[in-house]
Amino acid sequence: MHSSAFAFHTLSPDLIVASLASIGIRIDSGLTALNSYENRVYQFCDEDRQRYVAKYYRPHRWHREQILEEHQFTKQLLDNEIPVIAPLTFNNTTLHEYQNYLFALFPSVGGRQFETDNIEQMESVAMLLGRIHQIGAQQPFAYRPTIGLDEYLYQPQEILLTSSVIPKQVQSELKTTLNQLIKIVQQHWHNDWQAIRLHGDCHAGNILWRDGAMIVDFDDARNGPAIQDVWMLLYGEKQEQRLQLDMLIELYQEFYEFDINQLKLIEPLRAMRMIHHLAWIIQRWQDPAFPIAFPWITDLDFWYQQLVIFKQQIQAIKSPPIQLISRM
């Protein structure tokens, strides 16, 4: 994981205007910053009143080939009439560079927030994921990583255990509990699944509703098990999740066969996401946007609560994995 404390300190409005002009786009109005922590994203209108979104990639996170793979994947999905937002082509490329910043332009697309408790919307997402995975399974990413323990456990563990952001009073217990959680994940993590191209971060915030579901923001796309794009849609008690999972998989399988054995990966993947997310916040702490967005990361009470969550997750992994009702 690379430190990028001052990754965007030179990304001024003047530089943004100049970078867009370098590919023939002139801003007429707007240049409104949109909610994004990992990258910097701006909405604006050009001289023809066309609305765009410009995305400036965080330096040192993805290299050029990895970003282009994301672009090629979304373009492939769009060519197959799957509702995603793909980057636009200017000067025969979707990826541009200006003063060491890599950036891309996207159409500005509106939509309503996805409602997790709306059955119609959940059904639409299930079919959409099946279609995405059908395409994603045709070939893996060559440059983007595959979900695994090093990126999601071992590197984050090092960040968490060497951080000065975490209160000293909790560091010893955190080390012990974190080691226990990582050990149990190791015992339950199996690589007996087909690695396909995934969205990678398929939570409700990355889904729009526009007379049907649309999945946005493929910035975390990578290879991995199909269940990674499914489990984050589940919510509530276990019985509720079983009902949701039954419905999701039934419709998903109209387009792509789901490997039932991957259900055992849900709780290990949940633990990996917890640990990785905390380390991501700490890793980016010197970025001025992060202390504002995540002030609780330095609070002692937060970490005591996090220890409880880690211990609960250990028990969740030890418990029998969730099963489809239709298969019980």
Image (cartoon, helix red, strand yellow):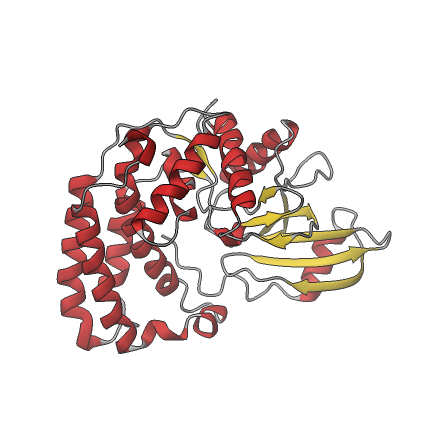
Q: Quadrant of residue 276?
A: bottom left
Asked whether 52 or 240 is in front, the reply is 240
Work out whether 34 lies above or below 196: below
Q: Residue furthest top?
A: 138
**Residue at position x 28%, y 60% from top?**
159
**Residue at position x 54%, y 53% from top?**
115
Return the x and y of residue 36 as percentages of the image width and height. Answer: 54, 60
Quadrant containing the C terminus in the rendered view: top left
Work out whether 50 lies above or below 137: below
Return the x and y of residue 248 as percentages of the image width and height. Answer: 44, 37
**Residue at position x 49%, y 38% from top?**
66
Q: Is residue 202 visible?
A: yes
Q: Is residue 100 visible?
A: no
**Residue at position x 15%, y 41% from top?**
187
Work out whether 255 lies above or below 170: above
Return the x and y of residue 158 as percentages of the image width and height. Answer: 24, 57
Drawn side of residue 159 relative to residue 145, left or right? left
Drawn side of residue 269 relative to residue 202, left or right? left
Work out whether 254 lies above or below 92: above
Asked whether 159 or 138 is in front, the reply is 138
Q: How many marks?
A: 0
Q: Quadrant of residue 49?
A: bottom right
Drawn side of residue 222 relative to residue 27, left or right? left
